[in-house]
């Protein structure tokens, strides 16, 4: 039997197996980190809010990267002073909330969580909330309704002819939308980890297309836009759809998509939510773009 360095080949095979076994043992002792997400809901102008929270919890957990917990704020008119969720131990807060103001202690804890490096994901009507909470408006960048106007900040949109973001400070309301319809989402920052590998254009399922959103718009990158057509009672402009922001050490992903459950079942919504949440937690995205991601001419949704 041939020998190498005094060892027979079968012995080397056993040695290799021992190394492999050790690797497997170490892998079991050091499993992949699960990022903890706290989903906040409760009050909303959307009747399907609770179902949406459950859907998003499932979308996140199916990646194998997250474990999500839903906490529900009191109903309107109930004891909001007693709403004091603990943010300790979480990596990301996902807001699916649009309602009455929280108490000062909860606001302070929320601000500290983001300021110190916690992630935040803002979904659809959550950017309507808290018009008078300065820190929150800096976190979300732009929002709508609830009395927002030029005093809240500029109207932000994308000018196709100039290929740049415009901040319009002229007088006007903050927040509107036309009829629900399918629309094309255009990638504007293809090199960003959330958008890398996604099509330049993709067809989103029937949804509200928010327009005329206003806010501080500081430390904000508009990742994707959608054109809001006048014939659908829209703005006639390219509106921000997906955004990232920085607040202190915290990373924020803001999506205006997801009005209805059928909107949230769009593979485009699901994928960008999953990737945006990972980015908010880590600053990176490891997830692959699914094969059934929508194209510019063909939508795709979960049954």
Image: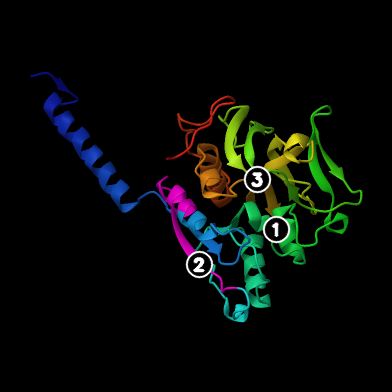
C-alpha distance separating marks 1 and 2:
19 Å
Residue 54 coordinates in the image, percent (x, y): 46, 56
Q: Mark 3 points at which residue?
A: 208
Q: Name the residue under label 2.
A: 71
Q: How far apart, in angstroms, are the residues tagged by discs 1 and 3? A: 14 Å
- State the mark number for residue 128: 1
First in sequence: mark 1 vs mark 3: 1
- Numbered range of the magenta stretch: 55-75
Residue at image x 21%, y 33%? Answer: 16
Indicate which disc residue 150 carries.
none
Residue 85 versus residue 290 in the image, above or below: below
Q: In terms of secondary structure, where does tag 2 sit?
A: strand
Q: In this view, does 129 lie to the left or right of 218?
A: left
Query: Could you tell me if residue 249 is visible in this image?
Result: no
18 is higher (above) or lower (below) than 147: above
The image quadrant that residue 229 belongs to is top right
10 Å crowding of disc 3: few (<14), some (14-19), many (20+)? many
The percent position of residue 192, horizontal first and vertical second, equals 63, 36
Q: In the picture, which quadrant includes the C terminus?
A: top left
Reply above or below: 250 against 180: below
In the shown orientation, is residue 254 left or right of residue 214?
A: left
Using the numbered discs, state the Cα–Cα distance from disc 3 to disc 2 in whole angstroms: 25 Å
Which residue is found at the position 59% from the left and 40% from the top? 206
């Amino acid at each position: 039997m041939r020998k190498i360095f005094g060892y027979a080949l079968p012995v080397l095979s056993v040695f290799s197996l021992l190394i492999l076994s050790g690797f497997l043992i170490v892998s079991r002792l050091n499993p992949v980190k699960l990022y903890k997400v706290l989903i906040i809901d409760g009050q909303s102008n959307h009747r399907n809010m609770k179902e949406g929270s459950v859907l998003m919890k499932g979308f996140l957990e199916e990646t194998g990267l997250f474990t999500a917990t839903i906490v529900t704020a009191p109903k309107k008119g109930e004891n909001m002073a007693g709403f004091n969720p603990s943010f300790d131990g979480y990596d990301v807060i996902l807001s699916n909330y649009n309602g009455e103001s929280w108490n000062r202690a909860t606001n302070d804890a929320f601000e500290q969580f983001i300021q110190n490096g916690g992630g935040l994901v803002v979904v659809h009507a959550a950017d309507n909330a808290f018009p008078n909470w300065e820190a929150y408006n800096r976190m979300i960048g732009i929002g709508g309704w609830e009395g927002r106007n030029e005093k809240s900040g500029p109207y932000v949109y994308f000018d196709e002819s100039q290929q740049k973001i415009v901040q319009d400070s002229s007088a006007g309301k903050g927040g509107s939308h036309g009829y629900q319809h399918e629309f094309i989402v255009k990638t504007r920052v293809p090199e960003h980890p959330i958008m890398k590998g996604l099509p330049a254009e993709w067809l989103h399922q029937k949804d509200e297309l928010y327009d005329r959103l206003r806010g501080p718009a500081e430390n904000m990158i508009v990742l994707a836009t959608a054109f809001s057509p006048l014939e659908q009672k829209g703005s006639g402009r390219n509106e921000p759809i997906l955004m990232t922001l920085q607040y202190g050490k915290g990373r924020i992903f803001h999506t205006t998509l997801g009005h209805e459950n059928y909107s949230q079942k769009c593979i485009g919504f699901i994928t960008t939510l999953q990737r945006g949440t990972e980015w908010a937690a880590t600053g990176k995205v490891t997830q692959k773009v699914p094969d059934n991601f929508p194209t510019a001419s063909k939508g795709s949704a979960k049954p």
